[in-house]
């Protein structure tokens, strides 16, 4: 693998030189605008106490929306807490994502999208994704698995175990690492001494690819090719280079640790939404009204989603004891009883 090569489209090719046509490009931009509207509204809702915490994905819309577009209908997605743009673009109802952030433990609507619950513990979804991939291969199923995670996840044992298993058992899995420069306050260069994250793939005998994560066309192309290879039993580790523009979560203050990040202005200037708008506008693929109209539609979709999420009953603390054990162990049973008694 050529470690230095970063796959990109926006700076290198016109749309006619890609597999995408104008409709594809407009659909990608529409989803990026929907995702950004979701992110901005979710942040505002958190600020007024509507939900307790929120991990913004601003700056990472291109890689997530591009990846979502590359998925076939039956492919499984294993998301994280920051994969909301991926899920929005995939068609998971916004109301489900919002209800989850309000404490509802599972996706509530009756959609048939093969989507795992988002993982909050770092990297636990990687072995799950490989297991799902191995099961699919064993049943000779057609679908592949896309597993999304951050640069910080690459330091977990689960990352090693999952990639190792995928290579040995030819699991149809695409590992999508969104290298957004930070794991909370830890910069990428302190995360690993490897020159690249994609380069780690070589140790597992699988393909490693780097892609410009602020370029939706490049992301869609690279993830699509990797999913095709996965269906032939060849896993891939993709490193998408991007940047977390906002705080880690609404509980974080990045001003305390990266105010002086020398890369910050350059990344802000490479905002994925503005960059794609400019690319399409310069080529006459979108007109003046496109962005405003798409945003208006997204805002209306959000109004409805919020209403639907508000209609869902909030979970009580008793939910803590549900969904893990079929029969609660005695110690947990006693804790549940104590909680009930305290609740009066
Ligand atoms: C197993 C585990 N250890 C620690 C944490 C606390 N934690 C939450 S997010 C995070 C950083 C993750 O960074 P990265 O993987 O780069 O993802 P990003 O937040 O940048 O999307 C950590 C350490 C956790 N959730 N799970
Ligand atoms: Mg990160």
Image: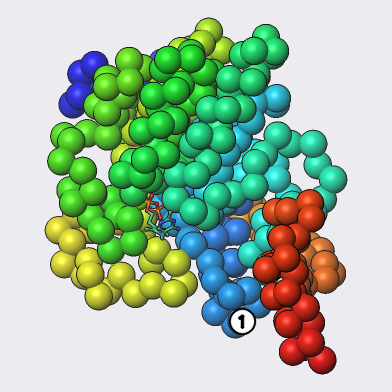
Q: Quadrant of residue 177?
A: top left
Report the residue at 56% width, 43% height from top.
79
* Residue 52 locus on image (x, y percent): 59, 75
* Residue 13 locus on image (x, y percent): 34, 22
Q: Is residue 305 above or below residue 271?
A: below
Camera-side residue: 15 or 54? 54
Camera-side residue: 129 or 214? 129
| Left or right side of 129 for 219 | left
Number of on-image labels: 1
In the rendered image, the quadrant that contains the N terminus is: top left
Report the residue at 38% width, 72% height from top.
252
Report the residue at 61% width, 14% height from top.
137
Reading the image, the residue beneath label 1 is 49
**Residue 188 visible from this viewpoint:** yes
- 10 Å neighbourhood of mark 1: few (<14), some, or many (≥20)? few
* Residue 277 locus on image (x, y percent): 45, 44
Report the residue at 51% width, 23% height from top.
173
In the rendered image, the quadrant that contains the C terminus is: bottom right
Q: Is residue 108 above or below residue 222?
A: below
Q: Quadrant of residue 245?
A: bottom left
Furthest residue to the front?
A: 330
* Residue 56 locus on image (x, y percent): 48, 61
Q: Element type at marker 1?
A: loop
């Amino acid at each position: 693998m050529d470690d230095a090569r970063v796959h990109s489209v926006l700076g290198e090719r016109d749309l006619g030189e890609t597999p995408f046509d104008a409709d594809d490009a407009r659909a990608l931009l529409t989803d990026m605008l929907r995702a950004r509207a979701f992110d901005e509204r979710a942040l505002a809702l958190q600020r007024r106490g509507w939900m307790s915490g929120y991990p913004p994905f601003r700056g990472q819309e291109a890689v997530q929306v591009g990846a979502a577009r590359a998925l076939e209908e039956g492919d499984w997605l294993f998301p994280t807490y920051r994969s909301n743009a991926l899920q929005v673009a995939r068609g998971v109802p916004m109301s489900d994502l919002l209800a989850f952030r309000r404490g509802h433990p599972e996706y509530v609507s009756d959609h048939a999208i093969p989507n795992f619950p988002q993982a909050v513990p770092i990297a636990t979804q990687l072995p799950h994704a490989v297991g799902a991939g191995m099961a699919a291969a064993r049943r000779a199923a057609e679908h592949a698995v896309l597993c999304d995670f951050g640069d910080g996840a690459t330091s977990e044992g689960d990352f090693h175990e999952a990639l190792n298993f995928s290579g040995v058992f030819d699991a149809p899995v695409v590992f999508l690492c969104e290298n957004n420069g930070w794991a909370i306050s830890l910069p990428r260069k302190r995360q690993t001494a490897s020159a690249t994250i994609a380069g780690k793939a070589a140790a597992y005998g699988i393909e490693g690819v780097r892609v410009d994560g602020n370029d939706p066309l490049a992301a869609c192309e690279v993830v699509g090719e990797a999913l095709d290879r996965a269906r032939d039993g060849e896993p891939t580790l993709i490193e998408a280079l991007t940047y977390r523009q906002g705080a880690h979560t609404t509980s974080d203050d990045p001003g305390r640790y990266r105010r002086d990040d020398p890369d910050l202005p350059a990344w802000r200037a490479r905002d994925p939404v503005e960059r794609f708008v400019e690319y399409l506008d310069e080529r006459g693929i979108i007109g003046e009204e496109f962005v405003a109209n798409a945003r208006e539609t997204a805002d209306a979709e959000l109004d409805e989603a919020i209403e639907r999420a508000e209609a869902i009953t909030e979970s009580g603390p008793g939910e803590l004891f549900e969904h893990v054990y079929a029969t609660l162990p005695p110690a947990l049973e006693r804790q549940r009883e104590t909680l009930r008694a305290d609740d009066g």
